[in-house]
Image (cartoon, rainbow, N blue to C red):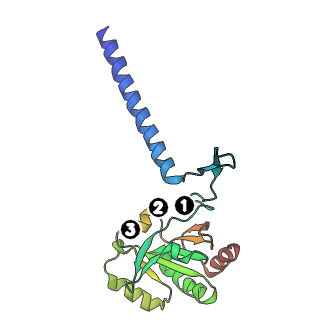
Amino acid sequence: MKKWILIVVVVGMIGWAVFDFVNSQGKSAEEFESVDETQEVEDENGSEVAEESEEPTIGLEVGNQAPDFELETLTGESVKLSDFRGKRVMINFWATWCPPCRAEMPDMEKFYQDKDVVILAVNLTDTENSVEDIESFVDEYKLTFPILMDSNLEAATLYAIQPLPTTYMVDSNGLISNMAFGALNYDLMVQEFEKME
């Protein structure tokens, strides 16, 4: 009899621990992904009424507000994504050692020259051998768009970057309109650019 009571207590404790863990994970994910969408405002009688907010959800899905980040460029300037609100932006995560990244760079440069687009080429600097390798790469491909240095992989972590290259197209309202995993060619870049506001 004592064994059964002990087994029931242990199973109950394990069940509670699992429930508590799963419940706390769900809450933290909801807090990260959602913004408080209601505000209390007073109507003409002075009563408080909930009003829907127009703020989009910050996240990594198409239609979400692109998470903001601030990084230094290869030339030492500080750049924030939000500085480019009102313009169409291509955020490209890349590294010099990545063959598909090398393959798409000439098309990115052509795209940058031909269209009124902001390109933020975020280099995963922490994965590179040296900054000199990045400078040599930029010289070799004659790149003229800003190269952002993600020294601590903060932006890469924020954007949950797995394969390289990964590209996010962000419209003039700061909303993600497209994401691509792998190299893009010039025609695909132009196609996605023309879909954006």
Identity of the residue drawn at 68% across and 76% down: 191
Density class for disc 1 (Cα within 10 Å; few <14, some 14-19, many ≥20) is some
Indicate the quadrant where residue 133 lies: bottom left
Which mark, residue 60? 1
Q: Callout 2, which amino acid?
A: Ala
Give 116 or 130, whichever is nearer the viewer: 116
Q: Marks 2 and 1: in contact by CB < 8 Å?
A: yes
Label 3 residue SS? loop
**The residue positioned farthest toward the top in the image shown:** 1
For mark 2, does the 10 Å Cα neighbourhood hold few (<14), some (14 to 19), or many (20 or more) residues?
Answer: few
Q: Secondary structure at mark 1?
A: loop
Q: Amino acid at mark 3?
A: Leu
Please tell me which of labels 1 and 2 falls first in the chain.
Answer: 1
Q: Amino acid at mark 1?
A: Leu
Q: Residue at x 41, y 28 (%)?
A: 15
Quadrant containing the N terminus in the rendered view: top left
Q: Residue at x 58, y 57 (%)?
A: 57
Residue 51 picture location, percent across and down = 65, 50
**Residue furthest out toward the left:** 2
> Between disc 3 and disc 1, whose residue precedes?
1
Marks 3 and 1, Cα distance to the nearest angstrom?
17 Å
Q: Nearer the viewer, residue 20 or 95?
A: 20
Mark 2 vs mark 3, CA separation in Å: 10 Å
The residue under label 2 is: 160
Residue 98 seen in the current view:
no
Residue corresponding to mark 3 = 153
Q: Position of residue 36 (x, y in %)?
A: 55, 51
Does dot 2 land on a helix, a strand or a loop? Answer: loop
Q: Residues within 10 Å of mark 3 (few under 14, many from 20)?
A: some
Is residue 89 visible in this depiction of the protein? yes
On the rendered image, what quadrant is the C terminus found in? bottom right
175 up-or-down from 184: above or below: above
